[in-house]
Amino acid sequence: MVRIFYKEKKQIRKENDVRMLSQIPNVIWVDLQSPSPEEEEWIESKCQVSFQTPQEIVEIESSARFFEQGDMMVANSNFSKIDQHGYHSYPVSFLIKNTTLFTYRQGDSKTFADTVKKMRVYEEPFETGIDIFLLLLETRIEADADLLENMSREITNISKSLSNEKKPKQEILLKINTLQENSMMLRESIIDKQRVLSSIQRSRLFPESYRERLRIILKDVGSLTEYTTFNFERLEYLQDTFTGLINLEQNQIIKIFTVVTIVFLPPTLIAGIFGMNYQVMPTILHPYGFYLALILMMLSSTAVLWFFKRKHWI
């Protein structure tokens, strides 16, 4: 699917028929969402542009994330999203030629849908594709901030669960590990944007009039990077707390078994002595020898427990 946005007087119009591209004046944005090979070839031939392959878009080298080619700027970045399966990232390619923006992506994106809504609501004029490009970045940063706030709420809930739970559960540790993975993925996506935007800021093709706005966007991205670091540190703290609670529980169990072993050691010794198979043995012929042995065993256990209590070991 291809959506063509163009300016007619002061209004932004949309056209979905790619064959009308050559007849539309003042085109400011061409959005290619999972385009067919025919649509892609048509736009390349009519607009004199060349889109990268999906394999080239996802390459991580700096030269592949941003480069200039003649009068074109090409920037590739990863956007993040959340669904019922968790956090995911997907690549988006931006191409700016003669102030016209071309975007290439696979699948639907809430960021792009929100940007189109803002274009219809905002009163400020959108003169060129660079206005749309910066609006897309601002919308994406707002979405990343929402993801970070959602993650922060989840971390807070886990912290409260650890405080309220008398015994730590395995599910809490699994949630912490999942949030750590999501936090790292989101941080990588934000740092990727920061690197791409820094390259655009140094570009000779980027208009000087937009550099201040781009600088503000870069500052916002830097704030998000610090936020992800804070969330990750909180998760590490929660993981250490969980591990500490597990160690305390294990130490308590070991302590109980140790006390039980020591408490029953004297009675076991007495039982062993009275169980020796000798003909001559004190109290062996005593009518109350059996009961005397039981009393000694109980007294020895009680004495050990009393000693432990006095020392505050139990």
Image (cartoon, rainbow, N blue to C red):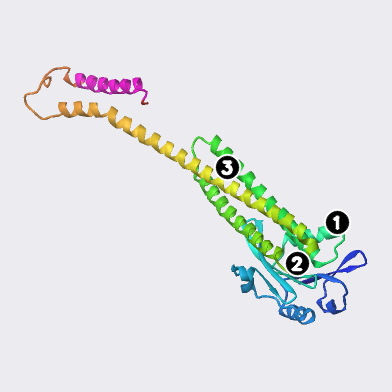
Which residue is identified by label 3? 158
Left or right: residue 254 versus residue 133 is: left
> Which label lies toward us, 2 or 3?
2
Depth check, mark 2 against mark 1: the one in front is: 2
Front-most of residues 306 and 210: 210
Please determine whether, in this image, residue 187 is positioned above or below residue 75. above
Gap between marks 2 and 3 measured at Cα: 45 Å
Mark 3 neighbour density, 10 Å: few (under 14) some (14–19) many (20 or more): some
Task: Please tell me whether residue 37 is drawn above or below residue 112 in the rendered image.
Answer: below
Query: What crowding class fits label 2: few (fewer than 14 Cα within 10 Å), some (14-19), or many (20 or more)?
Result: some
Residue 122, label in figure = 1
Contact, mark 2 vs mark 3 (Cβ under 8 Å) = no
Contact flag, marks 2 and 1 (Cβ < 8 Å): no
Q: Earlier in the sequence, mark 2 or mark 1?
A: 1
- Magenta stretch: give its range: 291-312
Rendering quarter of residue 127: bottom right
Of 152 and 7, nearer the camera is 7
* Label 1 element class: loop
Observer-side mark, 1 or 3, equals 1
Residue 305, magenta (yes or no): yes
In the rendered structure, find residue 206 and report the number of the disc placed on it: 2
Q: Residue lying farthest top? A: 287
